[in-house]
Amino acid sequence: MKILFLYDFPLWGSGSGTYLRNTIQELVKLNHKIGILCPEERRFLADDIKQYTVSPPQSPIFIGHPELKGAKRYSELSEREITEIYKSYLDACLEAVTNFEPDIIHIHHLSLISWIGRYISAIYGIKYIITSHGSCLYNLYGDKRYIPLCEDAVRNAKAITVVSGDTRIKFSKLFGKIFEKKNIFVIPGGVDVSLFPSQVDTSSLDKKYKIENKKMILFAGRLISHKGTKYLVKAAKDIAGEIFIAGEGPEKQYLLNLIATKGLKNVHLLGHQTEEKMLKFYYRADIFVAPSVWDEPLGLTILEAMASRTPVIATRKGGIPLLVKNGYNGIFVEARNPKKIAKACNKLLENDELRKKMGENARKTIEEKFTWKKIALKFHRLYRKISKNNKK
């Protein structure tokens, strides 16, 4: 089938972009013809994937995006700005539809690009589905201006997919009981396990950071208040290991001040790291900590840590319970509680056998449920189901 994807961010720098890139690569292997409309130049796409570039007046964000520093949030846009962005996407999508002639349009994010899908469907009769990654719902809860047209887009979509059960609950609460009978499917993100071998040489990290024979606790992600990184930093004085924090974001200076104020010597802010370097950190880490204080849609870094056989200490927020099973591949801790974080970290740091067993279980969880091949197969079946129903 010919699938046209609509996406409102650059394909790099966010969990939804990673989700989309990997999914379409696997769909190509399943013999689908893929087109994609997004606001960036081609950077990774294979020649057999058709790309259409949209040039909106600006690319707004839901919460944050490392490649869109200083961008306005959707909630900060004026009515005129919303309209101008909509027009740019509509013009680009009309061209893409005429050129590509898709069988299905697949929209990622329930935002103004979902309005585009609704319009195209009404004019051309092309069916569409919408995938919510969670952050788009966060925006709708805070800005009611987008709800009426998003509601219409949802009502006429052939299917809705979400990345976690928690996102599904929030979706239903937002749009009411009228949508409980919609075809809403939970299709989480995944990992390319071929990029996570049985072993990785991490000796360069030991040498660079002088941590030979020391335990490492790792956090990776955007440095925003939602991620709860400050609670890991506050727990540091009671943790018997070196804490490494990879990422950039508006909370970075606050964390630096917190480290200085508390005189912490075992906390290291790394800044943004390349995928190659992050792989080494995932493998070198004894524990990965995800102290989120908001309902994390899924947690790409958690997936990657688990694929590296690293057990996870996390809060029971959002889609995280879909990945982490308490006592099996990780430990749940109470949100905003540095003492509980420190206690859980030390429990695993002091028990090598338990930590290794949880790490192996983490990898097993990924292999059984969260590979991109398995994720793409779910969409493959959904597309076929929609196509079959259309022919009746």
Image (spheres, rainbow, N blue to C red):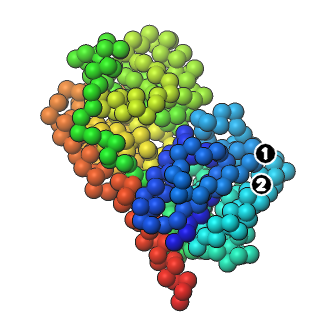
Sequence-wise, which precedes: disc 2 or disc 1? 1
In the figure, residue 41 lies in which quadrant? top right
Return the residue at label 1: 57
- Amino acid carrying label 2: it is Ser
- Residue 173 x, y percent position in the rendering: 56, 62
In the orientation shown, which residue stands out farthest toward the front? Answer: 47
Please state which of residues 52 and 207 is positioned toward the viewer in this rendering.
52
Please state which of residues 231 and 299 is positioned toward the viewer in this rendering.
299
Where disc 1 sits, the SS reads loop
Rendered image: mark on residue 88:
2
- Amino acid carrying label 1: it is Pro
The reply to whether residue 210 is in sight is yes
Q: Decide if residue 61 is on the left or right side of residue 265.
A: right
- Residue 129 x, y percent position in the rendering: 57, 68
- Residue 123 x, y percent position in the rendering: 74, 75
Instruction: Name which residue lies at 73% across and 63% down.
Output: 95
Instruction: Name which residue lies at 22% across and 17% down.
Output: 213
Is the residue under label 1 in contact with that under label 2 (CB below 8 Å)?
yes
Task: Give the CA separation, mark 2 to mark 1.
Answer: 8 Å
Where disc 2 sits, the SS reads helix
In the orientation shown, which residue stands out farthest toward the bottom? Answer: 392
Q: Decide if residue 239 is on the left or right side of residue 338.
A: left
- Residue 31 x, y percent position in the rendering: 45, 67
